Amino acid sequence: MKKETHVIDWQAFLFRTWLIMPIQVMCLKLLLISDLHSNPYALEAIEKTESWDEVCCCGDFVDYGPFPMETIRWCIDHHARCVLGNHDAYVLGLSEISCTEAKREHRFRWAHDNYCQLTEEGLDFLRSLPRSLSFSADGIEYQVQHQYDQAYGTIESEEQFDAFWTGPQKKETERRLVFGHTHRQCVHMLNEHTLWLNPGSVSYRRPDDHDKRAHYMIVEQGKIRFGKVAYDRMPLLNRAEAYLKQGTMLETELQDAFFFFGNALTSREPLPESCTKLPKTEKGDHDCETC
């Protein structure tokens, strides 16, 4: 299948968003988002609720949602500063052959669905994402990266923070690390000038959190505000229901979707229709709780 081609001036886009040197931003309002997971409806709800001067995204644009290109285009259109997430890297490692084999061998996942939808524009966007970026806003230094380690570790000491930090080392300057990955909205203060924060996931929560709203953060003149807004989950649930009827996607992938976007009480609740013919997740398979 030939990928659809869209013309975009990537050189200008990269120059505008991801300069190698730290970016100086004198803005009044910064929107921090992460873990979008192919969910443009959550982004649209945030846009209807908030205004901002700059957008920064901590990665995971794709997987575990049905609308990857719409999500990527939203970020391009809003000139978001972005970094690569682990799900983005996973999807980039797929191919048309691997997706065809996954469907034939009953291992088809949202990651395969998303790869099949990505145009060259979407693939180029993901390939161009840096692992980290730095910028200054309102006299505060920021460093953005999707995750701290390869699991769900967090920075618990100033020593850990200093070892991870690659920006200016002036002690009198406030420094902030911005992470995504855990889908848990929080601010962790290490001292009055040092903290790390996580805006949470725009798209969905972890299995122990039943909040269905889109999570994000607003930073206005250095002050951090937690944001949560309800959004229309029905289009995402409809895609999961369509796959349920087709019987081609792994049962656990659909169970996740019915928990994220429907009213299932757990991420392993029985599906609303008979799923005896759906393929099961095999031991060792890609799973959202371990990546």
Image (cartoon, rainbow, N blue to C red):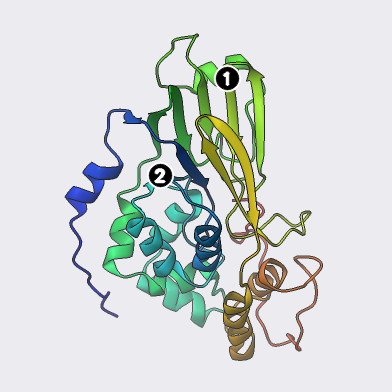
What residue does disc 1 label?
A: 194
Q: Position of residue 215 (x, y in %)?
A: 62, 52
Q: N-terminal of the two: label 2 or label 1?
A: 2
Q: Is residue 21 left or right of residue 199?
A: left
Residue 244, image x, y percentages: 64, 85
Quarter-of-image position of residue 187: top right
**Residue 194 appears in which quarter of the rendering?**
top right
Left or right of residue 166: residue 6: left
The percent position of residue 204, horizontal first and vertical second, equals 64, 59
135 above or below 127? above
User: As drawn, is 219 to the left or to the right of 94?
Assistant: right
Which of the 4 quarters of the picture holds residue 224? top right
Q: Residue at x 68, y 66 (%)?
A: 260
Position of residue 43 relative to residue 183, above or below, is: below
Decide: few, some or many residues near mark 2? Use Cα within 10 Å; few <14, some 14-19, many ≥20: few
288 relative to 17, above or below: below
Amino acid type indicated by mark 2:
Asp
Query: Tag 1, which secondary structure?
Result: strand
Q: CA distance from mark 2 to mark 1?
A: 24 Å
User: Looking at the picture, which amino acid does disc 1 mark?
Assistant: Thr
SS state under label 2: loop
